[in-house]
Amino acid sequence: MSSFDAVPVWAALLVGACLVIGAAITLAGTIGLARFGTFYQRIHAPTLGSSFGTGFVLLASMLFFSVTETRPVLHELLILVFVIVTTPVTLMLLARAALYRDRAEGNDVFPEPAAPPDGAGPEQNEPPR
Amino acid sequence: MSTIILTVAILFAELLLGAALCVACWRLLKGPRAQDRVLALDSLYLTAMLLFLTFGISSGQTLYFEAALVIGLLSFVSTAALAKFLMRGEVIE
Amino acid sequence: MRRVLAHPLLWLALFAMWLLLARSLAPGQMLLAAIVASIGSWAASAVEAPQPRLRRPGLVVKLVGRVLADIVVSNIAVLKLALGRREPRSKFVAIPLELRDPNGLAVLASIITATPGSAWINYNARTDTVLVHVLDTEDGDAWGQALKRTYESLLLEIFR
């Protein structure tokens, strides 16, 4: 472990707080992943880590390197942009795949409406598996 | 002073992220279906990426940033490919 | 040349990406960044990516602000559900949409999925209906109406 004496105390407090908050939010997201009952509920959980968890950890990293290198370090923004753009895409693909598999097995969680519905289709909770 | 603060905070963050890895692994092993496992793998990738960024802060090197970026890219490609596989049963049509 | 500059936003994004990765503003890196951005932009026009046409760019700022605020609120709500004892009242909601622009739909899908409390499941192009899974809501129809009021109306104005 290297020495961080060159870092001012305010920066150390800020970096430490951001790191711990980001890590805690990511942990909460995976706990949700483990606790929620159905797949469609579980798909919401990792978004916690990919929105605020990643945001806080990257903020900590940007602050830390900006202070230690005494110039703005912004390349972490690339990871942030990348995660923001890709997470919805992968989750959508996965949700569609899950829906397709459920429908193919005749285990229809939400039946396709035959005609354009005026309002919303029948509401129903997914039956517990 | 700042050494103590940062050392403790980094250690604590690493423990939290390690716990997150274990919880995601539990879901990966338990399933029950393939899509649950892929979802768990995706959050495993994300947590590993954040862990690498934390290592980067603790070592003071920007080398870990590149590793985190590569993990992020791999996570996207592999999850997209696996979702495609679940959809049709084959990756290349 | 027209194909190279057919996607100015993509060109700028790729240029910025290269300079951030190289971590320098040296003229040589700028030249390389311009080459990479031009190749990427040319590739995008070669695969005929639909060109986004922003009619009201000023509204994008409003949209981003609203999305950030919603993500904060939704993060806290999902955090409570993940750690608390209450069972989430999750529902599938089918929402008929007036938005037809593919870029607008892509933005709407990303917004809904990036917000932790909701996930875009499937879009039916035949009936122009989207299936959204909401993690915790009492009234699915009211949730869908609120989504149409806040986001769809804004996106309809931005993408025409």
Image (cartoon, grey):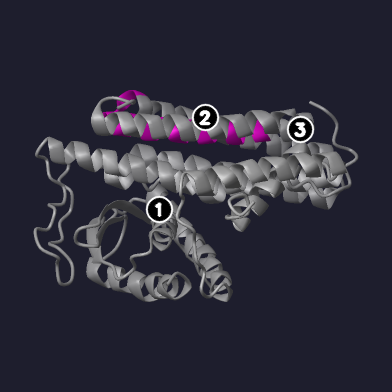
Main SS class of the magenta portion in the image: helix
The CA span between labels 2 and 1 is 20 Å
Q: Amino acid at mark 3?
A: Thr
What residue did someone put label 3 on?
A: B62
Q: Can see residue B32?
A: no
Q: Decide which of A65, A106 is in the foreground and name it.
A: A106
Residue drawn at the location 44% of the way across and 29% of the way down: B78
As for residue B46 lying within the magenta part, the answer is: yes
User: Label 2: chain?
Assistant: B
Check chain identity for marks 2 and 1: say if they share one: no
The CA span between labels 1 and 3 is 31 Å
Where is residue A5? Give x, y as percent.
89, 38
Q: How many marks?
A: 3
What residue did someone put label 1 on?
A: C113
What residue did someone put label 2 on?
A: B74
Residue drawn at the location 55% of the way across and 73% of the way down: C62
Q: Amino acid at mark 1?
A: Thr
In which quarter of the view is residue A1 placed? top right
Q: Are marks 2 and 3 in contact (CB under 8 Å)?
A: no
Q: Amino acid at mark 2?
A: Leu
The CA span between labels 2 and 3 is 19 Å
Q: Is residue A113 above or below residue A69?
A: below
Which is closer to the viewer, label 2 or label 3? 2
Residue drawn at the location 16% of the way across and 51% of the way down: A110
**Residue range highlighted in magenta:** B29-53
Report the side of B12 relative to A103 (left or right). right
